[in-house]
Amino acid sequence: MEARVVVFDLDGTISDPLPGFSRSINHALGLQGLPERSPADLARYIGPPLYESAVELTGSADPHAHARLIADYRQRYGETGYAENTLYDGIPAALRALRDSGATLGLCTSKRADFAERILRLFGLRELFAFVSGGDIGVHKWQQLQALRESGAVRTGSVMVGDRAVDITSAHRNGLRACGVLWGFGSLEELRAERPLHLAATPGDLPSLLLSPHL
């Protein structure tokens, strides 16, 4: 079998970023005189690009308020928030099992690439990944995957693994297969609605699902 390329989302798939994310968002909101919000309320904003959520978070249509929110968030996140992050149990073993079985691993996240690289190094996982694709303002995840397809990094038969609907829809838009994971921030209903090929209940399920010759 030709080596399979498996592309992972980061937040909610490899690690839980909620403490650092929520503290950094609340820092940015506070600088605009806006009230803090609970981590539980902010969890739904993990996954989609932050620029898409800025209107709702600021309660304003002013693009300057959105840009300031993102800049202030990134300033704190880059200093401390990225490390306020917890690796999901079983992820390192699953990634190594996939890599050791011949799969090529990649990362595709809406998070800026330098932040993603820093997080992978924090957890000692960077050497497992052949490539890292990060997002930026105005760039959708489906466009990131499209660029990876055009470069030859991914191809038909490659698999996108993620916890939110955007991961599944972006994969399908680019002719990739998709595997949803149930330990992140997307609900079972959200994922099922997009018809992924597989749903993984635990990280330990990933090697057998993703290396199946029938995938």
Image: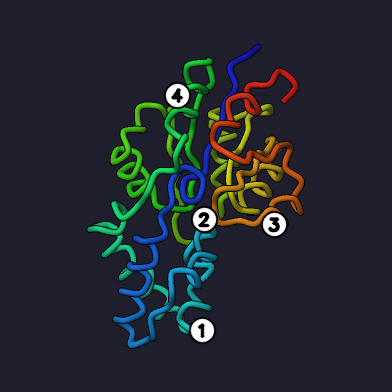
Q: Which residue is mark 3?
A: 190
Q: Earlier in the sequence, mark 4 or mark 3?
A: 4
Disc 1 residue type (three-letter): Ala
Please name which of the two marks, 1 or 4, marks the residue nearer to the observer: 4
Disc 2 residue type (three-letter): Val
Closer to the camera in the image, 65 or 177: 177
Q: Earlier in the sequence, mark 1 or mark 4?
A: 1
Q: Which residue is mark 1?
A: 61
Disc 4 to disc 3, how far (Cα)?
A: 28 Å
Label 2 crowd bin: few (<14), some (14–19), many (20+), radius 10 Å: few
Disc 3 + disc 2, Cβ < 8 Å: no
Closer to the camera in the image, 68 or 180: 180
Q: Check disc 4 and report its element: helix, strand or loop.
A: helix
Residue 136 sits above or below residue 15 on the image:
below
Q: Check disc 2 and report its element: helix, strand or loop.
A: loop
Closer to the camera in the image, 200 or 44: 200
Examine the image and state in which quarter residue 178 appears.
top right
Q: Which residue is mark 4?
A: 96
Disc 1 to disc 3, how far (Cα)?
A: 27 Å
Label 4 crowd bin: few (<14), some (14–19), many (20+), radius 10 Å: some
Q: Earlier in the sequence, mark 1 or mark 2?
A: 1
Q: Earlier in the sequence, mark 2 or mark 4?
A: 4
Disc 3 to disc 2, how far (Cα)?
A: 22 Å
Q: Which residue is mark 2?
A: 139
